[in-house]
Amino acid sequence: MNKLYESIDKLVDYAKKHLALSEKNADYVRNGIMDMLGAAFPSTGAQSGNAGVAELIDEFASAAVAAKAFEPEDREKYCDLVMGALSRMPEELQNEFYATEKSAGAKAATDAFYTYCVNNNYVKKAQLDKNPRFDSDGLVITINKAKPEFRDAKKAAAGNSVGGGYPSCSICHENEGFVGRSKRTLRTIDLTLGGQKWFWQYSPYGYFYQHGIAVNYEHIPMHVDIGTFDRLMDFVDRFPHYFIGCNAALPRIGGSVLAHDHYQGGGESLPLHKAGAAFTLKDKETGATLEILDWPGTVIRVVSESRDAIRTTSEKIRAAWVGYDAPKLGIIHEDKDGIHNAISPTVVKTERGYEMSIILRSNITSEQYPDGVFHAHPEFHVVKKESIGLIEAQGLFILPGRLEGELGLIEDSIIHRRNLPSELADYKFIYGEILSRCGDKRDGKTVNAAIKAELGSICSRILDNTAVFKDKQLTVEFIDGHVL
């Protein structure tokens, strides 16, 4: 039991150093933790030293299981309960955020809030840092070892629901402190977007730097309308160091939580934000510049210093696209299966003003492509079958954790000049392309580089699959004929 007692005292000491736990509150919190575990003991005086939260919480959990304080399957629950008890109350942390924002600016406030969410173990940074990540073919590729793969969109949605009706879904504000979802460590910051009450939180398993979500306090379905552009601009007006975007509000081309209105953003410049223009047009009515991006997907970037110009031009594009048909191209905006056309808008602020990139999406299916005509095609499903949402559409691909092992087997086979393992038969086409990239060289460095290059190429081709217009000139014709 001594190891358990010491681990708790180390966490209390850590909280004093990193979570603003006061000396006055330390005994109170420590007693609360002991009560959770059915224990009582005097302080051991154990110190946390330079240990990080992941190390300390793992030490606590292992000691608690060994002492039979809780069962191994309850590990996540009790770790969350303990760290929640050591963390500041939501309003205290929010008030500090507002004070920092006022005195030192928005970036200082978000940096401090993010650091706190890492320190209290809500953001699982130690796990995230283990995810392989590299640049390839102008894209960023990550292999997500922290979360399960959802190859079925319905199962993905189910994975984000909450049984019993409370909270209504996995991102409702009522999750703050909710034990049933291990959210005792969740902390949020209230925002006003478009005159509505929203809140900001960081993702525990973020895909990029300071990945967070802005969520409507009201549990209403995802939607994109003219007000969306205003709310996105409100966000970057307040946090100009972040980007913010909205998933298309349809299955297969949107996020897994379509039942609750929310946006995603954070502190990283994604590949789409850096893409150049293949063609440039002008909206004479608003003065806004329209750039047809040199990008595998179909994206129109609206640029202006004027919010009114951005709103008006962006809404013209949205309204034109949601009702657009081009049957020869496989584009049908609505049929017996419902509505198929939608947009994903995403905005950054630069020296040019607002840059609102509008990604044209379609979730229509066909007999040939039952998972989506403008989705990753079947030959690529072994790498990526999950929905291609807002983040992938901007050039950051989140690939399933199983790839690390499977590609490791492929790498080993090529280096040792063995045939493709039979259990990896679905990789036959991709395996052949990797071999071609290697040529006669089969050393580890060459093969590893070939695999990374192949993944970048596949992800670029998946984005091309999602493009509703395969020729940039067709995008120009759409804008000229239906928007301007």
Image (tube, grey):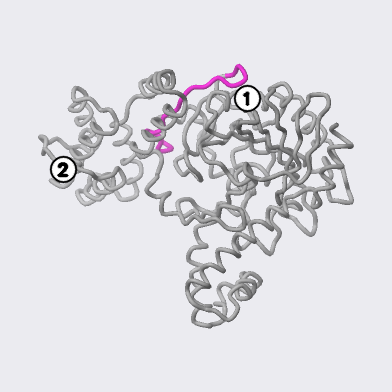
Q: On residue 231, which mark appears? A: 1
310 to the left or right of 106: right
Please tell me which residue is depicted at 79% across the width and 59% down the height of the picture. 368
Residue located 63% across and 75% down the image: 436
- Are dots 1 and 2 in contact, CB under 8 Å? no
- The residue lying furthest to the front in this view is 351
Please give the range of residues in magenta.
180-196
Tell me the residue at 62%/20% (across/down): 194
Q: Is residue 231 left or right of residue 481?
A: left
Q: Residue at x 40, y 50 (%)?
A: 127
Q: Secondary structure at mark 2?
A: helix
Residue 404 is situated, as x and y percent measured from the top left of the image, at 49, 63
Residue 453, percent across and down? 59, 64
How packed mark 2 is, by other alpha carbons closer than 10 Å (few <14, some 14-19, many 20 or more), is many
Circle 1 or circle 2, nearest the eye: 1
Rounded to the nearest angstrom, the CA distance separating label 1 from label 2 is: 48 Å
SS at mark 1? helix
Amino acid type for the residue under numbered disc 1:
Arg
Q: Amino acid at mark 2?
A: Glu
Give the quarter of the image for residue 98.
Answer: top left
Query: Was residue 195 drawn as part of the magenta stretch in this picture?
Result: yes
Residue 86 appears in the figure: yes
Observer able to see residue 249 = no
Quadrant housing the C terminus: top right
User: Which sits in the foreground, 119 or 249?
Assistant: 119
Q: Earlier in the sequence, mark 1 or mark 2?
A: 2
Relative to the observer, which residue lies in front, 247 or 369?
Answer: 247
Question: Is residue 42 left or right of 268 when viewed as pictured?
Answer: left
Residue that numbered label 2 is attached to: 6
